Image (cartoon, coloured by chain):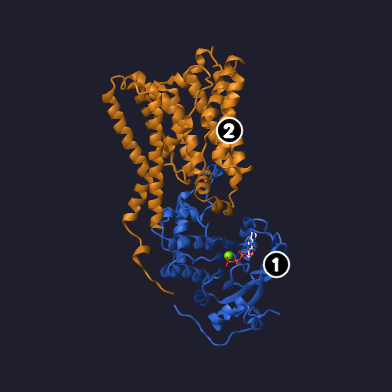
Amino acid sequence: MSTTSRPEPTTEPTDAGAGVPVLEARGIVKRFGHVEALRGADFTVHKAEVVALIGDNGAGKSTLIKTLSGVHAPDEGEIRVNGRPVRFSTPVDARQAGVETVYQDLAVADDLTVAANLYLGREILRSGPLGRLGLLDKRAMRRGATEALSQLGVRVPRVTTPIAMLSGGQRQSVAVARAIIWATNVVILDEPTAALGVVQTERVLDVVRRARDAGMSVVLVSHNMPQVLEVADRVEVLRLGRRAARFQADQATTDDLVAAMTGARATQTEEP
Amino acid sequence: MTTVERADEAVRPGDWLRERLSNALSEFTAAAALIVLFVALSFASPHFLTADNLFNIGAQTAVIAIIATAQTMVIITKGIDLSVGSVAALAGVVGAMTVRDLGFSVWTATLVAIVIGALAGLVNGLLVTAARIPPFIATLGMMSAARGLVFIITGAVGVYGLPESFQLLGNGEIAGIPFAIVLTGLVAIGIAFLLSQTQFGQYTYAMGSNLEAARRSGISVGRHLTTVYVIAGVLVGLGGMIAASRVNSGQPNYGIALELDVIAAAVIGGASLFGGQGRIIGTLIGAFLIALVRNGAVLLDISIHVQMVIVGLIIWAAVYFDQYRRRRLESRG
Ligand SMILES: Nc1ncnc2c1ncn2[C@@H]1O[C@H](COP(=O)(O)OP(=O)(O)OP(=O)(O)O)[C@@H](O)[C@H]1O
Ligand SMILES: [Mg+2]
């Protein structure tokens, strides 16, 4: 575990030349009654990168995540996937566009097995008329789950173990793995390690890295600055419902991030 | 990057066994209690091990088991159905009137009873999903409304004067096996299959385990949950018809406090009121146990009032055991 700390903060936007963003939000406005949670927020995710989305409490991170995953419809602004404008009215729409989200608290069904959770809502059915009756092909799902988890390096006792019997880290890893397995474009993780210990956190981050190395884009919401700098390729800072700054992770320090979050040195990093 | 390995993350060989055992623990416990009770009653009463009495227990078990199966489905979704007794009475009474007043066959009457149950289930389901009324209150309302309907349509008088054929479901037999037991077997196998082998079953457990996770997985939880209540209603309608058939009449007072017996049966068998858990095999054992308690109490001349106390104690014990098990499992997390 190494924390990058360089003296010089970078000020330039870093998406130049990286091609069409895999996921892009422009000028997103979201109001709850008279509370304006997002006030023209921009956000960019490129292919095969880990982007950390950071910001103070109430900055609008979760709200932004929810508009990107189809939970909230934005009042204004545009979302593009691979350059194509999209409109998500339900989480299912977002998933069909290849965007999978892990919410911090309600990722998994505890009483179901690991395999059942990985395939929840996308069960493999038997072929033929039995399948049309809704008969599950449990063996195919067990095999698929075992294979997918080993590819991602997620260790669980068995894929037939109920989630309730797993440790917190294993549970979170399964939730993250589930998103990665089904995502074709972007995986969004809202504070996936907030409740975990050091070893378990490392496990989850390892899964994130593997996914990135396999070409997946990952959005990571986190309040843990050293972790952000350790795992992310880029960092986007949200403040008061707007993008306040962007950093290349290997050229930023914790101080830079905190400054951008609080607005203390905002002039340095403000978007044009 | 790092491959830190720690004992708490490693795969332990004992886990597989523990997993299996904890799944079946309530079923084992219930089965053991069942055997003990059966043996004890054989000694305690000379009338217990007679063909007539065993047939009687079978029919009694059948009604409780079918309705407890319905209750189990609802409990798995983290719901509860307090209306089963009233709806069973409504179905039985209407079934009886279909034969007596309209002259239809017992088969048609059974179909009518089932439709009545399904409609009640549909209303319950819509109250829970569309109107967002908690299951406890939604079905409490149905418990009162359905019972009221029973009294209105019968004028609070039993429906008598039925032909012999009306007794088919409750007292008939096929090859020496009570017809009610055959029906119970079919229902149990069908629902057990539905719950354990199909996508519908998977969604039922998922909704009870974590409704929000199920919703975000793209499951249309409203429609699905409503279907669970409708299927439960179908079973309650069938159970009510069998109960009416046993006494060859439609009884407006039938099924008062029946919800306690079937909730007890389901929970004894391992269904969890916290949702997400429950198997039909366990519910069958639980239903048999409750039927034995009822039958034994009659044979041993224990008053109905004492029986009520006993059933209350059983419910407390089963639910306590359930939440104790949950807590232990969660403290592992
Ligand atoms: N459903 C809602 N109804 C009303 N206001 C909301 C709702 N969701 C968010 N808000 C408001 O929007 C603003 C942004 O909240 P959001 O949850 O997006 O912040 P956050 O950056 O995720 O904060 P945290 O770090 O605390 O999770 C806050 O002022 C919050 O009170
Ligand atoms: Mg948040």
Chain displayed in blue: A
Residue drawn at the location 49% of the way across and 26% of the way down: B255
Q: CA distance from mark 1 to mark 2?
A: 46 Å
Residue drawn at the location 42% of the way across and 35% of the way down: B264
Judged from this view, the residue extending furthest toward the bottom is A7
Which tint is chain B?
A: orange
User: Residue A269, can we see it?
Assistant: yes
Q: Chain of mark 1?
A: A
Indicate left or right for B207 with B290 as reference.
right
Quadrant of the drawing holding the C terminus of chain A: bottom right
Residue drawn at the location 55% of the way across and 33% of the way down: B233
User: Residue B186, can we see it?
Assistant: no
In this figure, which residue is indicated by the disc labeled 1?
A28
**Crowd band around label 1 with a 10 angstrom C-alpha radius: few (<14), some (14–19), many (20+):** many
In this figure, which residue is indicated by the disc labeled 2?
B142
Observer-nearest residue: A102 or A128? A102
Judged from this view, the residue extending furthest toward the right is A76
